[in-house]
Image (cartoon, rainbow, N blue to C red):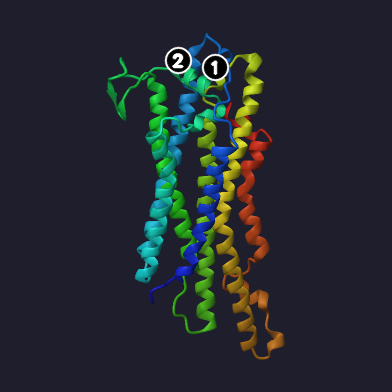
Amino acid sequence: MSNRRVELRYFSIALLPVLIFVIHEVMQAHLMPKDLNVPIDVLQNKDTWLEAVGRYRFLAASWFFASLAVLAVAVLARNLMRPMERDTRIAAIATTLAVFGLALLPTIQQYVTASTPQIYHQVGKEVFETALSKGTLPGCLGPDDFWLLGRCGEIPVFTMFRRVLDIVNALAGLSVGALIAGMILCLATGDSETVEETADALGRSLQQMRQQLYLTSLILTFGMFFASSWMYWPLPLISESAKGDYSSLVTASALFTGTYFCLLMLSFYLPVALILDGRVKKLSRAASKGAKPENSFDVEGWKKSHGLKEGTGDFLRAGFALAAPILASFAGGISSITV
């Protein structure tokens, strides 16, 4: 089996999700409110144990999403172990690490500059911190005590939220890098000599792309579940009179986050899908020219026999199916699930 390779120019596809990331950061810095100043009197003073409702959801979503992130890295590692040229393997690893490093920048900036807005500010800084202060952590009797992830801090549950969020964000950056590199590796080609051999190899590339798309869709969906889990954390403690308004705020915030996630994922899937679709069309023309007589050649049957049946429309439909979390958020689907 010959070593497969990806032309290094194709790794520039990673610049598209980087552009989406940069646009998102610019919008966060210049277009989003730094602090919505949601009054803390929207919180009820009774039934403070309801804080645990949001905490259970957050920890469950964090655990599951972190597991999926590790799965994405494992899938990439498996692909990198297959026979391929050294330059291609190095480029895939470098792409993954570059995206991972870029994803860590906001977290690092938050620790370096105390005035940097935190992600939870978009749903009300004081309300969020006050709601989480109603809970306790086992083993945290004082702010200087140590627990699993370091010092307890003045608000132990809030400290736990920040630490877990940092860990999950790091894993998310690593998984996105792995997904981008894995998708680009679907463009690998070998040294096939005949049209039939090339068609079989191209069919395997399409199958690999579909697998990457399924994994991407899974991570996107549960990424939205993770994001909504912390956004809705204070909601059980909101008074009934303010719950509808606060829920609308959180749903709108989830819509913005879901839009970002979907655009990020589509930015590296669609270019690869369109490139592979172009290869299918080119190979189909070559196969029909080699047929004798040419007019009797069944192009669609030939494509189906090699797993090349799907066309541009199918790729686009599959890609835009990733927008389902956005539609669910816009229609209030997230709130009906998580509240």
Q: Secondary structure at mark 1?
A: helix
Query: In terms of image quadrants, where is residue 172?
Result: top left
Q: CA distance from mark 2 to mark 1?
A: 10 Å
Quarter holding the N terminus is bottom left
Residue under the point 68% across and 91% down: 293
Q: Residues within 10 Å of mark 2 (few under 14, many from 20)?
A: some
| Relative height, residue 138 to residue 161 (above, below) | above
| CB contact under 8 Å: marks 2 and 1 | yes
Residue under the point 63% across and 50% down: 321
Residue 318, given in percent of the width and then of the height, sits at: 62, 56
Residue marked by disc 1: 237
Between 118 and 241, the one lying in front of the other is 118
Between 232 and 97, the one lying in front of the other is 97
| Relative height, residue 270 to residue 327 (above, below) | below
Examine the rendering and report whether any part of residue 71 can be seen. Answer: no
Residue 315, given in percent of the width and then of the height, sits at: 62, 61
Residue 112, given in percent of the width and then of the height, sits at: 37, 35
Examine the rendering and report whether any part of residue 327 can be seen. Answer: yes
Residue marked by disc 2: 134
Q: Is residue 140 left or right of residue 311?
A: left
Q: Earlier in the sequence, mark 2 or mark 1?
A: 2
The amino acid sitting under disc 1 is: Leu
Residue under the point 38% across and 25% down: 159
Q: Residues within 10 Å of mark 1 (few under 14, many from 20)?
A: many
Q: Which residue of the protein is positioned furthest toward the right in this rendering?
A: 295
Q: Which residue of the protein is positioned furthest toward the bottom in this rendering?
A: 292
Residue 245, given in percent of the width and then of the height, sits at: 66, 22
Between 57 and 95, the one lying in front of the other is 95
Q: Which mark is residue 327?
A: none
Quarter holding the C terminus is top right
